[in-house]
Image (cartoon, grey):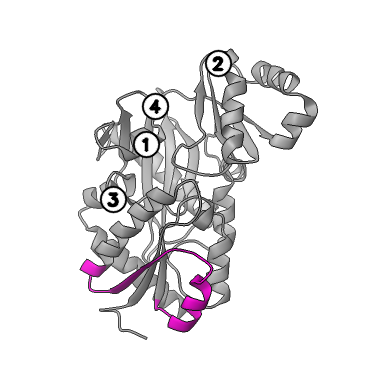
Amino acid sequence: MSDSSGLYVVVLAGGISHERDVSLRSGRRVADALTGAGHRVVLRDPDAGLLPFLASERPDVVFPALHGSSGEDGSLLELLAAIDVPAVGSSGAAARRAWSKPVASSLLAAAGVAVPESIVLSHESFRELGASSVLRVVRSAIEGDLVVKPASGGSAQGVTIVEDPNDLPRAMVEAFTYAEVAVVERRIFGTEIAIAVVDTGDGPRALPAVEIEPTAGVYSFQARYNAGETTFYTPSRLADATVAAVSDAAVLAHRTLGLRDLSRVDFIVDAEGTPWFLEANVIPGLTETSLVPLAIEASGTSASALYGSLVEAARDRTN
């Protein structure tokens, strides 16, 4: 096994999810950062040859940069654990808790975090009970504007803001394109804030908050990954007390879901300063336009230093 000054790290990127291209961009950035930190890095797609490759190569650490179900539903993480390959990030069980937005929201609500009122609908129930009847109940149960999104997945794919009730059926179809279960929740108006939470061995801590201001008003897939479509403020322009409350909520979410090493927790902060939980990401985007790298830079460290600390912590945890 290599010494800590130069570990053999396999960065996993790509996969077959809807977020493949984003994952490849994240993986390249991680690989460059770790190479800059003095580690020997191989960038690898998760394919049929991956597990035999890892069993043969026995890298010191795997760094998954896989978005969507390829890396975040817990399956790959449990397989890595089963073959005793150290990996940066959460356990498979913790990843599953965060991957399911309804499960994560239920756990966070029980922990005292504000969560938008919602109704969770499976595609099967939607068909069996009749779309018109189901949507009539939904519209009467949740007042005002709605957000419809897949119950799993990221990068705002399949997410629709519904201001006109007549647009709800189309929004449901869009969400079901990405997952068999959809969430319809009350839209919270306010400031979108992302908090990166890191733990290199001395407990989880929040990095500086990233405030998100999309040019078009909605933080869509395009706004996330096309430069110039969103303005980011790090540190956030919110009051210090509000930022502290959001940061505390993010660390609580990280602990409640049992996450490890690195996560990103997203909130909407309303006019009263209440942070409303949206979702937690166990393998957040690490591209050139992603939020976590902005938070890392604002914290006064570098991606090379932080990712290097994470791979060393993963190696030490296994040893």
Q: What residue type is labelled 1?
A: Ile
Visible residue check, residue 117? no
Q: Distance between the residues labelled 3 and 4?
A: 21 Å
Quadrant for the N terminus, please.
bottom left
Q: Which of marks 1 and 2 is nearer the N terminus?
A: 2
Disc 2 or disc 4, which is closer to the eye? 4
Compared across the picture, whether 314 is left or right of 112 comes to left
Left or right of 78, for residue 299: left
Give the mark nearer the N terminus: 1 vs 4.
1
Of label 3 and label 4, which has the lower sequence position? 4
Q: Residue 52 colored magenta?
A: yes
Q: Position of residue 32 (x, y in %)?
A: 25, 63
| Residue on which the image places disc 3 | 293
Q: Residue at x 59, y 13 (%)?
A: 166
Which mark is on residue 144? 2
Q: Mark 1 points at which residue?
A: 193
Residue 9 visible somewhere in the drawing? yes
- Identity of the amino acid at label 3? Pro
In the picture, the disc for residue 218 is 4
- Say left or right for 170 vs 42: right
Q: What residue type is labelled 4?
A: Val
Q: Which of 227 and 110 is in front in this view?
A: 227
Q: Give the range drawn in magenta.
A: 35-60
Secondary-structure class at tag 3: helix
**Extreme residue in the bottom direction:** 1
Sequence-wise, the earlier of marks 3 and 2 is 2
